[in-house]
Amino acid sequence: MASEKNGRVVNQRDQDDDKNALIKERNRLLLRKNHLMSINEKLREENRLWKTRYDEVINQYRRLKHACVCPVDELKFAITSPSEKAAESKDKNWRQSTNDGWLSLWNVLPHLSPMTNIPESIDPPISNKRIRCLQVNLQHRKKSMERTKRIIIERDIDIALIQEPYAIGRTSPELYGVPTGYTAFHNLSENHTYGTAIIARNSLRAKLCSYGRNEVTGLQVRHREKVYHFYSVFCTPSCTNVSNVLSPLLEQTPPTSVVIAMDASARHPKWNNGMIYRKIDQRGKEIQRLLSQYALHLADQSLFKLNYGPGNYACIDITLGGDTVHFHEWKYWEDSALSEHPLIFFQVE
């Protein structure tokens, strides 16, 4: 009897050991599964970034290919050196022939329309490009700030309007991750986790607007004989009245030239929330009233008109403009800023 009892005890211990071994193996496999899922997510993210970069390279290649289709013989003749011109005929006006050369060259460059008259100087014309803008809420994340810095450089952004940026310090916080050749503008206080900032290219010679607070940052920019006022605005979740944030801004700034990039946390079908939220909340009603009162227009495009729309996103980031502000190519970028908010790109002229 004793030997039989001891045999049962040994069998029970073996079963317990096998059970514990199985549990350990299951936990190990679960950890391995989570690790593989994390790697898969990172690879998918990198794949999206490379796909976007690939599309940009293809588009640039097509533009350059189109630019190279030109009458080569005519171009060679048009830009012959002054000495050759003088050798052919001393009576010919060299400056006129050189200007004719610039004319032929301009006509084959992309995005430049033919010039009817050439200025006295033979320097190439200054580009009249639009202002390239980026809008994003970074949720006060360091990695998001680093990713945004890289995107600003790679995508040739002129102005980045940021909500909840990552800053260092408490009494006098400084913005983290400002690219070389750019300047950061902000009114950040000790509560800078809910603040705003604007990063602008130095060549724009931007100036900080007189009105500003922790959650409102304004920038004055002169471009192509027009003055724009860019504002980055964050309506905190505790904000009970949007008018308290926007009304002082609009009263002290010419509404016709204002550009407002705002995390509104408001729901209204006009900025695509109707596809997710059927009800209009109080913030949505208030912003709609301000649009009518100050003659502002919405830059946000309907999702069905865009090539890409972020999934599981409530579309609470909106872009507003005055009467004289013209928006172009407003869209969501597939690139991720490692934030729950998508990157928004648009151009202004």
Image (cartoon, rainbow, N blue to C red):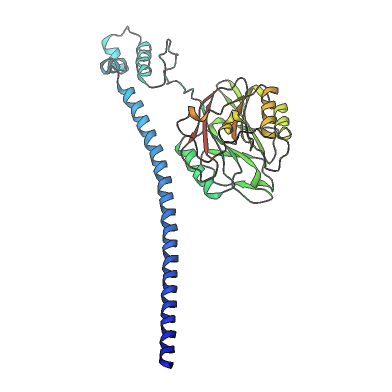
Task: Tell me if 307 is positioned left or right of 277 in this view.
Answer: left
Residue 8 image point, x, y percent:
43, 85
Q: How many marks?
A: 0
Farthest front residue? 1
Task: Tell me if 36 is positioned left or right of 142 in this view.
Answer: left
When asked about the image quadrant of residue 159, the answer is: top right
- Closer to the camera in the image, 82 or 77: 77
- Closer to the camera in the image, 291 or 71: 291
- Quarter that holds the C terminus: top right
**Residue 11 drawn above or below residue 41:** below
Residue 123 image point, x, y percent:
43, 20
- Closer to the camera in the image, 46 or 348: 46
When asked about the image quadrant of residue 53, the answer is: top left
Residue 193 image point, x, y percent:
64, 47
Task: Tell me if 83 is positioned left or right of 318 in this view.
Answer: left
Residue 235 image point, x, y percent:
67, 38
**Residue 301 drawn above or below residue 70:** below
- Closer to the camera in the image, 337 or 225: 337
- Quarter that holds the N terminus: bottom left
